[in-house]
Amino acid sequence: MATTAPPPSASHDLSGVTKTLDLLAPRWSVWVLMTLSSQTLRYAEIKPRLPWLADGQLHPRLRHLTSAGVVDRTEYAPRHVTYGLTSRGAALMPVLATIASWGDTYLEKDTVANKTTGEIEPERIPPAQNIDDALALIAPRHATPILWSLQARGSATAKTLATEAMPGYGLTAVYKPLERLAADGLITASGSGDYQLSASGLALSPVFQAISAWAAAPPAETDARRPRGQGPAPSQNRSGPWATTPSRRTTPAATAVRSAGPALTTTAPNSPAWKTGDLFSHQIPARPVSPTGGPRR
């Protein structure tokens, strides 16, 4: 087992990833981004597409994303304001596709009866919901640093993880995040007390790679909203364990951790992975599925 800490470049990558997760994690942020991914819309046009959001919820999300530089607010007149993705925001779309693909493959699903055939099959979850549920696992404080450290080391003791992923905290503080990650199925513990990534944890490699590349890309000097999907090119000088290491696990079979539904295709960071009519996979429910608190979702 390695005993040296990750190099400074890996820490830089980790910082960019955690800041990006902080941008995406507030609930409904992803839904707003995906709603704006194909066209510029006025507030009155966004609202019907996200009918479960009250005015008090939608306005803060738009302000948050505008302040972050991924949504552009254009005021033509006092009562004529439009919202659309900046080029930086458009470059996030394939990153979201990568997260959605991981969620569709590894997050647990209920089974439902097919209305046409009557056969029992995995429930179809909208990509935006898969993304939100995936973020709920990796965005909490200390979760990503612990996963990052385990990816670099292969395995580590709680003491090593406390020192490396939670500097300034005592040893006992690391156990709660470790218990949560184990319950979510992202890490496992050996009989000797070492921790390592599970198969689903290892499969997060392309997720963190995509986020790291987006975070490292410099903002465009002129952040025009047209044409869509042509954001800044990803950095070619990526570093760190998840920025340079390819996935250590091939695409799982249907018998893996959870039944794999139709997954979004992971593409290069400058080409959207979904079409205009496929943003939510199927008709948006009256209210999105809420996480049940069980393993992995």
Image (spheres, rainbow, N blue to C red):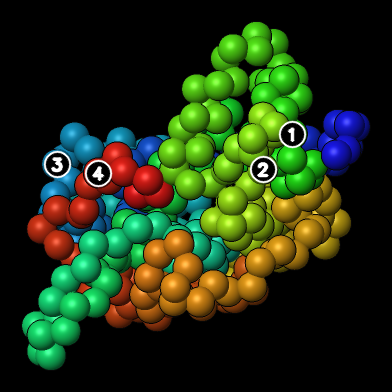
Q: What separation in Å lies between label 1 and label 3 (alpha carbons)?
A: 45 Å
According to the picture, the residue beneath numbered tag 2 turns out to be: 196
- N-terminal label among 2 and 1: 1
Q: Is residue 217 visible?
A: no
Query: Relative to residue 232, is residue 271 drawn left or right?
Result: left
Residue 122 occupies quadrant? bottom left
Q: In the drawing, what numbered circle is on residue 33?
A: none
- N-terminal label among 2 and 4: 2
According to the picture, the residue beneath numbered tag 1 turns out to be: 156
Q: Does residue 63 sit above or below 29 in this rendering?
A: above
Name the residue nearer the viewer: 192 or 205: 192
Amino acid identity at mark 2: Gln
Q: Position of residue 205 (x, y in %)?
A: 66, 57
Q: Position of residue 158 (x, y in %)?
A: 67, 24
Is the residue under label 1 in contact with that under label 2 (CB below 8 Å)? yes
Q: In the drawing, what numbered circle is on residue 292?
A: 4
Outermost residue toward the bottom?
Answer: 117
Is the residue under label 4 in contact with that under label 3 (CB below 8 Å)? no
Q: Does residue 177 sit above or below 92 in this rendering?
A: above
